[in-house]
Image (spheres, rainbow, N blue to C red):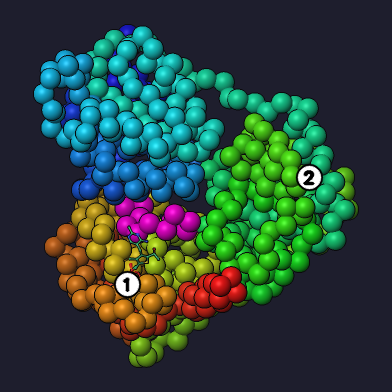
Amino acid sequence: MPTLASALLQGLKDHGAREIFGIPGDFVLPLYKVIEESNILPHYELSHEPGVGFAADAAARYHAGLGVAVVTYGAGAFNTVNAIAGAYAERSPVVLIAGAPGARERSSGFMLHHQARTVDTQFAVLKEVTCDQAVLNDAATAPAEIARVLRSARERSLPVYIEFPRDMVAAPCEEVPVLPRTEADPDALAECADEIVARLKTAKSAAIIVDIEIRRYGVEEQVAQLARKLGLPVVTTFMGRGLMENAPDVVAGTYLSAAGDESINRLVEDADALLLLGVILSDTNFALSQRVLDPRHTMLAIDREVRIGHHVYHEMPLEALIGALIARAGTGRTRKALARGAMRYPRDLKADDTAIMPSDIAAAINDLFDKHGPMPMTADIGDCLFTAMEIENTALAAPGYYAGMGFGVPAGIGVAAATGRRPLILVGDGAFQMTGWELGNCQRYGLDPIVVLFNNCSWEMLRAFQPESAFNNLSDWHFADIAKSIGGHGERVATRRQLVEALDAAVKRRGKFSLVEVMLPRGVTSDTLARFVSGFKAAREKKA
Ligand SMILES: Cc1ncc(Cc2c([C@H](C)O)sc(CCOP(=O)(O)OP(=O)(O)O)c2C)c(N)n1
Ligand SMILES: [Mg+2]
């Protein structure tokens, strides 16, 4: 009979986990020993728990399975709260497993080390940023508890929390079952799909907007098939950038409203039928929109619900809905699918001795991808993310809605570990100061991401909104000089020629991370961020 620890690890694997990210501590040492010795799942240790959470989140996003983070009680678990909150906001199914005191310790009468207020404060805090929870204090019920929580993570595509008291690790325990999926009611599904297809076919101008859930449920290809059958263009949200990278024939571009391309704005804002698949109705996705989305013209499928006009269909899994729509789509009149080319991306950067502007970085990366093939990308929040909007639609994991800094580098490590592919990481100097040092862990796992560091010695995105504040001035940390001492290769570039050469050399350099530190002037931003800020200010003045 397995132990509770091995049953949990096997259960994670059976539910789609591919690896574990973590930092051990005395409350998880026994569990960590089983993780290392059982080899059920590969494991990667990082240096600070925020990075553990970001890496597990990005791994979940890229392999559309479960991300797993294992941390110690109290100090470790509380360090993950921001990363798990970001995973909740952006619907990434991370399983957070935290150690906890055993039964005897709990009743010892002592305050325990790592305890905050009560012994259960950790559970209370993490309950707020997870959709389901389990405390494994009874081996008889643990398999069913784990199965329920892991199904919740998969079906809701949201983080979950498992508390593992350290005296339960070796408890004999049954295997963890994989529960049957919660299906949609077939009649409700048929009625919902009929209604959507009817609205799309009678519309004068329709479009599909996609966001992160289509990746979380692994249905990007099916959405492309649906769009082709309906003859409708697909637009991604800001948060959904990089989705459907393999369907350039139907993806028109990214809707950035006032900050974006006018031809895309027209597709969305002039439509009298919009099908929103997995879309988060957030300020970063729609706040600059010239027009509030009219519920009479909008059909929104997210979080297992479909809202059409003013009525809602419940328990409607996205993958089932899209299957039902595809089955109905072929019978209607087809529209000419929007040919690619609605968006023009900067290319052919002149490799001369002029200073680099943020949008030059996008052109250099587009040229690099044309020459060497696209790379999976991660980005932090800051102008690097807005610059990413000027890079050809490539797979991207970024905190486009939650907008928490520190995500970019650990997320890149998570993608490298989870996919075996080499990521391109975009990060600003402020965000790099937070978690960039996790790059030092690449050497022990033989990971070799390429990092493009936007060094403007500034919290430039804040300066764009509030130029008068001197607190946005950061000093120059000379990051490239530090790269070597943490196992990588660093190069500082200040001209477009140096940038092109450094990127080319980085692609050819394998076996260690390459940090390309791009010096940018303060007070300058990408074209996209400049439009975003002016759009934001205009929208604010309009509301004032
Ligand atoms: C964890 C965390 N702390 C603070 C912020 C606020 C914040 C921004 C958002 C608005 O909330 S953008 C930004 C500056 C980013 O600086 P850097 O990484 O150098 O990028 P760039 O210079 O391109 O702006 C901060 C501090 C944040 N988003 N996340
Ligand atoms: Mg900066």
> Cβ(mark 1) to ligand 1 < 8 Å?
yes
Asked whether, in this view, residue 207 is left or right of residue 282, the answer is right
- Tell me if residue 216 is in the magenta stretch: no
Q: Type of residue at label 1?
A: Trp
Q: Which residues are magenta?
A: 399-414
From the image, tell me which residue sits under label 1. 459
SS category of the residue bearing label 2 = helix
SS category of the residue bearing label 1 = loop
User: Observer-nearest residue: 304 or 377?
Assistant: 304
User: Observer-nearest residue: 199 or 31?
Assistant: 199
| Residue at image coords 76%, 30% | 188
From the image, tell me which residue sits under label 2. 196
Using the image, determine if residue 106 lies above or below residue 59: above
Examine the image and state in which quarter residue 451 appears.
bottom left
Image depth: mark 2 or mark 1 in front: 1
User: Observer-nearest residue: 476 or 222?
Assistant: 476
Using the image, determine if residue 263 lies above or below residue 201: below
Examine the image and state in which quarter residue 272 appears.
bottom right
Using the image, determine if residue 103 lies above or below residue 380: above
